[in-house]
Image (tube, rainbow, N blue to C red):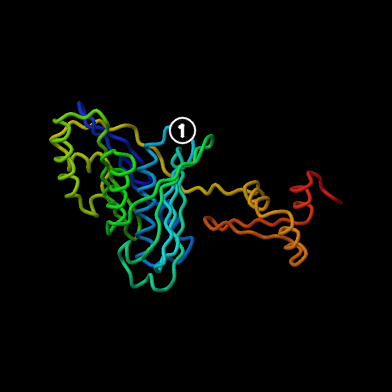
Amino acid sequence: MASGDQFQRFLFEDSQVRGAWVKLEKSYNEIGSQAPYPDSVRRVLGESLAASVLMSSTLKFEGTLSIQAQGDGPVSTLMAECSHDRFIRGIARYDEQAVTRDSLESLLGEGRMAITISPDKGQRYQGVVPREEPDLAGCLKEYFERSEQIPTSFFLFAGEHGSAGLMLQKMPGDTEQDADLWDRLNHLASTVEAEELLNLDSETLLHRLFHEETVRLFDAEPVAFRCSCSRERTLSALEAIGKDECYDILEEQGSIEMDCQFCHAHYRFDRNDIDHLFTGHTLH
């Protein structure tokens, strides 16, 4: 199987245990190049991106799933998002203290983490992720245990040139035999090394970890970086700011200029644009 940016589902035959695997290379590097991230921040962002792709496999509709965190540590904001069709984007805001920190806990400090699910049609859902575990994989495991009541395990790694992840999930309706299998699979998965997850293709990795089990591997899906920003969405943001404030900015600056924080796309709006936004017609 070709290497690169791929996501793949799998399941263990005759059981209620399923899983997913992801490897990110080009998209990881594209997102990582948007800012001069220290290694520690780049690693946490990479793990978050891999986790967002793995969790997107649970979406039953068109939309996005994101991991968002705010804290009082060196990393004030962390965000990774994946759409149902495996387009990802992410960002971290940090200060120079982040260079000397390593763990998720020391980078974020005290703060809040949440999973946000945003359907293209329908109501947005947000669940709070417990922050009691030292790493992202542990925090997400606790989230699924408490909020979803679905036993789920994550194994996440990120390096200089890529990030990767493995997810195991036990579905409702499991038997005592499934419980034994679940414990065995988690023990085997916990032996995975960063080098294996980052460098091996899915077939080789799953055979190496679970060669005594019958694993059904579904077709691989490509993953890519793509920002969902657009001129129309930026105008919607201006509309939310309000008419008076937009015209105040125009008076002071002559135009309104906005940059996307994810891809650095630049949008400029003049008075005609703002007139059309708030009155529905353009003045000449």
Determine the residue positioned at 46% across, 33% down: 61
Q: Is residue 192 above or below residue 86?
A: below
State which quadrant residue 22 falls in.
top left
- Left or right: residue 163 versus residue 179 is right
Q: Is residue 74 visible?
A: yes
Horizontal and vertical percent position of residue 30? 45, 55
Q: Which residue is mark 1?
A: 61
Q: Residue furthest right?
A: 284
Determine the residue positioned at 63% across, 59% down: 258
Q: Is residue 223 above or below residue 69?
A: above
- Left or right: residue 118 versus residue 110 is right
Task: Identify which amino acid the numbered label 1 is placed on.
Answer: Phe
Q: Residues within 10 Å of mark 1 (few under 14, many from 20)?
A: few
Q: Is residue 82 visible?
A: no
Horizontal and vertical percent position of residue 65? 44, 44
Q: Nearer the viewer, residue 174 or 201?
A: 174
Horizontal and vertical percent position of residue 146? 30, 44
| Quarter containing the N terminus | top left
Determine the residue positioned at 49% across, 41% down: 124
Horizontal and vertical percent position of residue 204? 22, 41
Q: Is residue 159 above or below residue 152?
A: below
State which quadrant residue 46 falls in.
bottom left
State which quadrant residue 250 falls in.
bottom right
Q: Across the whole image, how many numbered discs are drawn on residues?
A: 1
**Tag 1 secondary structure:** loop
Q: Nearer the viewer, residue 1 or 91?
A: 91
